[in-house]
Structure formats: C-alpha cells, structure tokens
C-alpha cells in the first residue's frame, strides 16, 4: 500500500489521483509493486499500443502524401 511521508498515512490505490500521487499534498507516491507491473501488462494492451503507433505513423505519412 502506498505510503505518504508528507501526510504520514497510507493510501489505497483507489484513493490516489490518476497520476498515482497523494490526494492531500500532491506528492507522487511510490508503488511498491512497480517491478512486477511490467509483467502484468496484458497482451491486448501492448497490441493496442502497437496499433496506436501504426495508426499515428500512417496519419503522419498521410499528412505528407
Ligand atoms: Zn500526502
């Protein structure tokens, strides 16, 4: 569970802001499971990112043609 030294309290992941910072002081909190987050990335999310890059690449090419 993320700990904020500034406020001296724990925050549930859902209690934090979208950026993963403290809702009270705005300090970015350390995620303890950051090392395993990479492995947990679902394959369909990676596919979405690849599709997005391909789409943006096509948009850029389309812009100059
Ligand atoms: Zn705080």
Image (spheres, rainbow, N blue to C red):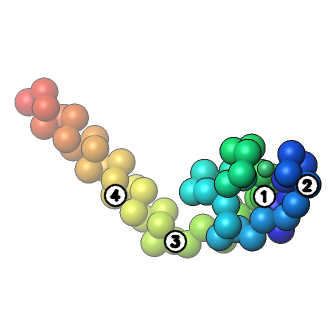
Instruction: Please state the horizontal and vertical placement of residue 19, each as a whole percent of the image.
Output: 60, 51
Determine the residue located farthest toward the top in the rendered image. 64
User: Where, by quadrant of the figure, is residue 17 drawn?
Assistant: bottom right
Quadrant in the picture for the C terminus: top left
Labelled pair 4, 1 in contact (Cβ < 8 Å): no
- Residue nearer the viewer, 14 or 47: 14
Q: Which-is-in-front pick, marks 1 and 2?
A: 2
- Tell me which label, 4 or 1, sits earlier in the chain: 1
- Residue nearer the viewer, 53 or 9: 9
- Tell me which label, 3 or 1, sits earlier in the chain: 1
User: Where, by quadrant of the figure, is residue 12 drawn?
Assistant: bottom right
Determine the residue located farthest toward the left in the rendered image. 65
Q: Is mark 4 within 8 Å of ligand 1?
A: no
Labelled pair 2, 3 in contact (Cβ < 8 Å): no
Provide the residue designation for mark 1: 31
Q: Is mark 2 within 8 Å of ligand 1?
A: no
The disc label shown at residue 43, or none: 3
Alpha carbon separation for disc pair 1 and 2:
16 Å
């Amino acid at each position: 569970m993320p700990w904020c030294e500034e406020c001296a309290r724990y925050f549930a992941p859902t209690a934090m802001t979208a950026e993963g910072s403290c809702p009270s002081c705005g300090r970015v909190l350390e995620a303890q499971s950051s090392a395993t987050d990479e492995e947990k990335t679902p394959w369909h999310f990676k596919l979405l990112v690849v599709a997005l890059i391909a789409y943006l690449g096509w948009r850029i090419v389309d812009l100059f043609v």
